[in-house]
Image (cartoon, helix red, strand yellow):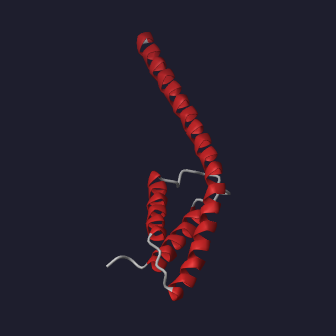
Amino acid sequence: MPPDPLETLRQVNEYLRSALLRLHPERKHCSGIRPQDFSDILTQLLRAAECLRGRVASSEANAGLERESLEYRANLEKLKQFLPDLHGRLLAEKARLETARTHVAAAAAWAQASKKTLQSTE
């Protein structure tokens, strides 16, 4: 039995609302964002696409489906506005981490050189 399109869209919209709150652009730290978050969003978008491709013509279900479709569109618009900002923040976080890694490597090299200097003076 195929899934109910209305219920599927409700679940997708609920997930997208939740994801938009969790990943909200006003959050300064990206460390809580995982690759799985993006995979999950993509999975939900694919579920909705499949659901919308197979719409039924029942007038009763149509009104509810139309409401959920409009909410889905609004969620997509929010994602469209949100994702470029998130991408910029993730790139900034990547640069910060690379800088920190470089500093750690330099400190480790300095410590190793200092250790060798101390050993050679003994």
Q: Measured along the vertical axis of the image, is residue 52 above or below residue 4? A: above
Extreme residue toward the left, this view: 1
Which residue is drawn at the image coordinates 45% and 11% (left, top)?
A: 121
Which residue is drawn at the image coordinates 53% and 29% (left, top)?
A: 102
Q: Measured along the vertical axis of the image, is residue 100 above or below residue 121? A: below
Quadrant containing the C terminus is top left
Which residue is drawn at the image coordinates 49% and 62% (left, top)?
A: 45
x%, y% of residue 55?
47, 74
Extreme residue toward the front, this view: 57
Which residue is drawn at the image coordinates 38% and 77% (left, top)?
A: 3
Left or right of 45? Residue 89 is right
The number of discs equals 0
- In this view of the protein, which residue sits in the foreground, 22 or 4? 4
Extreme residue toward the top, this view: 121
Left or right of 97? Residue 117 is left
- In this view of the protein, which residue sits in the foreground, 79 or 101? 79
Q: Measured along the vertical axis of the image, is residue 49 above or below residue 61? A: above
x%, y% of residue 1?
31, 79
x%, y% of residue 104?
51, 31
Quadrant of the rendered structure where residue 47 is? bottom left
- In this view of the protein, which residue sits in the foreground, 21 or 49? 49
